[in-house]
Amino acid sequence: MIGSRRNYAVSRILSSNGLLDSLVTDFYIKKRVGFFIRIIDIFFGNRDWFRRLKTRRSEDLNDDLVSSINVIGLCYALARRLINTERAKHKLYLLMSVAISFVVRFKVGYSRDVYWGIDGDSFHTFSQIRRKNHRAILILEQTILPRRMHSKVLMDQGLKWPAWRQGNESFEFDSGILKREQSEWDLSDYIFTGSTFVRDALIECGVSRQKIRVVPYGVNEFPAKVKKFSSGRQPLRLLFVGEVGLRKGVPYLLHAVSTFQKSDVVLTCVGKISVENTILDKFRSNVTFTGSIPRSEVSKIYESADVFILPSLIEGSSVSTYEALAHGLPVITTKNSGSIVEHMVTGQIVDESNVDSIIDAINIYLGDRSLLESHSAQCRAYKSPFISRYKDELIDTYLNVIGGA
């Protein structure tokens, strides 16, 4: 597995139920490598990417179960910062997936009963396992929209918003990547995903419905607090958390918010900025761009907002929507976010790629602030966004598929 994937959520859940034998990943901080990390910290301690790497561990996992390639993983993280195009980043990602497959081969072997992999980095590993162990159950976690559909959406959006494209980025995946994606689906016995949005996209790509299991994600529970919303005399405080770029539908959001006066609506955008600052300048009258912030500060950001808004074009099942719901924050989002938001119950579902639809949703809350209270009250109670619900559903579904295989 490349990355921590929701702080190793699946690995932690399997481990807590005695179902995890090994975790193979690119970078993981075990207790005994603390000195190595402190040395690197001298050179890179103030860099955002390294601060994120330092969070790569979990107290819920036994270090003895984890195999990582930290030196290669560190080089991979550095290289990604030097690459400017998505296509080149994907090629680098594929090289990293090959490295992971070697760790599986020499550290784990091919005799296990079940293997769990992530879309995009499991082709080499699954291919080797299938050749060596025909009885093994291969489970693929599809975390995002299939790449062939992902590519089409971004190419179309790049034509609509050319200034938002990075350099000469085409957003098009080469045929080799798409073939590997198809091979991952073919090799897998089951595909787990967090949303019906991704499930339907997989089916549209020819994947058998019988292979697919939908288990919505969950996040850690936050301390229960009485949510305080702004009054009608104060501006409605909108919050966006995610990469400021095309994939999250940010151009549509900014143009929608720009139609309101600062006295009525303000927006805070938290996350990496993937567009030239000059493009954002005309929206700064009622929009604040913070850039990335430490995870320790995220809870305060959610608590300070009235509405969370994420008009995504492409997701798997956006974790930020779960975090917002867990904080009692009504959510405006699209069906493409793969969230568990229910329209006019815990928030509003708007049309993707539609400025007017976003404006209408904002106006509904502006016109009736009492809706904020009622939707907030439902956020924790309806289809719980918490990890406890995710854990129960994941284990039940996992045991069902391995028991029935």
Image: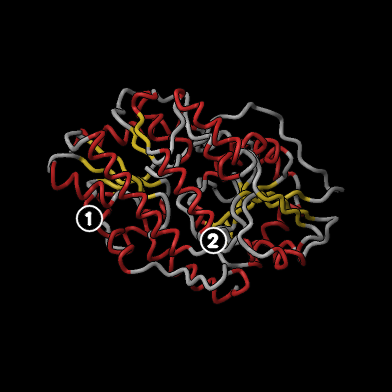
Give the camera-side residue of 58 and 16. 58
Q: Would you place residue 350 above or below residue 104 in this image? A: below
Residue 28: horizontal and vertical position, in percent? 44, 34
Alpha-carbon span between mark 2 and mark 1: 27 Å
Q: Tell me where residue 69 sits by quadrant.
A: top left
What secondary structure is found at the residue carrying circle 1? helix
Q: Would you place residue 333 above or below residue 7 in this image? A: below
Relative to residue 383, is residue 401 drawn left or right? left
Give the camera-side residue of 73 and 365. 73
Three-letter residue code for mark 1: Asp
Q: Tell me where residue 183 sits by quadrant.
A: bottom left
Relative to residue 210, is residue 153 drawn left or right? right
Residue 260: horizontal and vertical position, in percent? 79, 62
Residue 364 showing in the rendered view: yes
What secondary structure is found at the residue carrying circle 2? loop
Q: N-terminal of the two: label 2 or label 1?
A: 1
Q: Going 67% across and 65% down the picture, which residue do you hit?
A: 276
Q: Tell me where residue 207 sits by quadrant.
A: bottom left
Q: Going 74% across and 40% down the picture, which residue do you hit?
A: 304
What number is the disc on residue 247? 2
Three-letter residue code for mark 2: Arg
Circles 2 and 1: CB atoms closer than 8 Å:
no
- Count of numbered marks: 2
Residue 104: horizontal and vertical position, in percent? 26, 39
Q: Going 34% across and 27% down the picture, which residue do you hit?
A: 65
What number is the disc on residue 186? 1
